Amino acid sequence: MSQSEAAVVVRGVVKDFRPGLGVRRKRVLGGIDFTVRRGELFGFVGPNGAGKTTTLKILLGLIHATAGEASLLGHPAGEAAFRRQVGFLPENPYFYDFLTGREILHFYARLSGVPREARGRRVGELLERVGLAHAADARLRTYSKGMLQRIGIAQALVHDPELVFLDEPMSGLDPIGRKEIRDLVLQLHAEGKTVFMNTHILTDVEMLCDRVAIIVQGRIRYEGRTEDFLGGAERCADVTLAHVPPELAETFERQYGAELSGRGPHVEFRVAEKHAQALVRAALDAGAELRSLTPHRVSLETVFLSAVEEEARERRAAREGGR
Amino acid sequence: MSAAVLRIQTLAVNTLREAVRNRVLYVLLFFALVLIGTGVLLSTLSYVERERILQDVGLAAIRLFGAAIAIFVGVGLIHKEVERRTIFTILSKPVSRTEFLLGKFAGLVITIWMQVAIMAVGFFAVSWLAGAPVTLGHVQAIALTAGELALLVAVATLFSAFTTPMLASLFGAGFYVVGHLTRDLRELGAQSDSATVERVTAVLHRVLPDLEAFNATIEAVHGLPIAAAAVWQPLLYGVGYAAALLLLAAVVFERRDFR
């Protein structure tokens, strides 16, 4: 991939913190590498304390890397001038609560260099877009968490940036709030913006992201297309049948490698997706009735958990080797 | 207007707006005005120099309340932004850390100058009601106080850029007290027999701020003339000293990690 196609490039980034006044360093990022392409919806996934927010803050210049290089849209991370092209929603955002929704967006628009003549229109559009036009002149201290999250997204977009960073955008929201933010993220993607999303909510990543990187204890364990690694394992389907002749279950196990996963008035088989159709046809021919057919995918959670376990295993082995 | 100046102005106006919408400052301002008014009562306790006592108390109230606001609001100026994480969204915009510091500093200085102006109006009103003379010397003394307060805000901004409000308050208050004693320190050194002590106190007098240079209360209250140089020289000194402090604050702030 050429440099011009990359929105974010991270190479060998290391970050050490010194907790308290101590001289001992704590390594939070152990030399990470990944790339985000322009126009991509990228999920940066990891458990709490894995280094997601630290990485994001390094990219935005809020934290200095101990070693390594990071660039955004071809500029070194931390350069203030080009942040005109970058938007950021922090985790659990807090804004000046003595301002109204409209005032805070005007404030950020001025800081971002939005021309005076375009400012009013842009702010009005964004308030409409995030569904806060009705509360535009209320002070932020009266806003609910969901409303603050939405004003947070509006401030991230007020200067129409090319690259948007969202840190745990769905955190603490109710299902309706999550759906609204999800729709907004998809809209941004459809507009051609590059969206970098830090999250630990895996279903959102599965649903939204083109590519993901999994970070565990400051190390990237996986980077690639969401589809690729979800599709890496064999897909299967859950078939629920009624009135199944008893001998049929054995036949299915033998013939299609089906796994009987439930008994009762309804019988449920888990079978490889490629055999699902044949199994259903044979069952119907034998007088059974089809109740449901659910494709079953290896979830991101499975991959994520195995990455976490693998990291723990490697650390254990390294510790034992060191003894 | 350049983009950087516009950003600094935006941050300054916002800081001012925060102060205007903050009730605590109104309370402080109210007590300052009460103290200025109390000068009338205090002056009745004396048969002589009533007007001077009244104006002495009034000018002292402006200086002390101004210093209290400069230090105690100033020390939270940057720390609060980091603690509440409002700085994250601001620095993710095309705003440099130095612009952020300057914007916050300018906003608080304007806020304090507005409060000094209100207190000055109160002072002149009380003087007029009590029949005390109001001269150019009083205006000059208040202008010098305004200069001193801007310098104190720079001190508070520096400490706020790297430490907690509690420590910054202690450092700021210490700076204020020492700043008013540096002339005595120099005098003490000059009277010492030891050349080393004399040299050390002379260096300290040069390095530490000379806040007494901003104090023209005695001249103003006694109706003594204050030369123009006694106003512009301390103000120029204040600008230079504040610039050096802000430069140091910017260097410290630039290196910080906002976790």
Image (cartoon, rainbow, N blue to C red):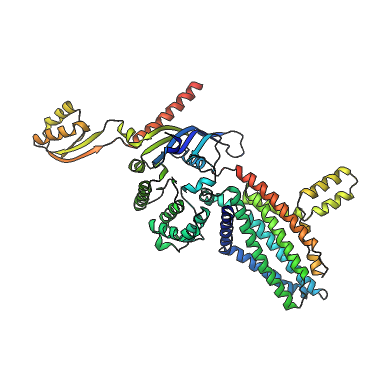
Q: In this orientation, which residue lies closer to the viewer: B42 or B136?
A: B136
Residue most extreme to the right: B193
Q: Position of residue B243 (x, y in %)?
A: 69, 51
| Image quadrant containing the N terminus of chain A | top left
Q: Nearer the viewer, residue A126 or B214?
A: A126
Residue nearest the viewer, comparing A188 with B86: A188
In the picture, measured across the screen, residue A76 lies left or right of residue A201, that is right
Residue B103 at least partly seen: yes
- Left or right: residue A295 versus residue A154 is left
Q: Tell me: B76 left or right of A201.
A: right
Residue A46 visible in the current orientation:
no
Which quadrant would residue B44 be assigned to in this image? bottom right
Q: How many marks?
A: 0
- Could you tell me residue A200's position as x and y percent? 40, 41
A29 relative to B26, above or below: above
> Which residue occupies 48% across, 21% down?
A321
Q: Position of residue B161 (x, y in %)?
A: 62, 48
Residue B221: % across, % down: 79, 69
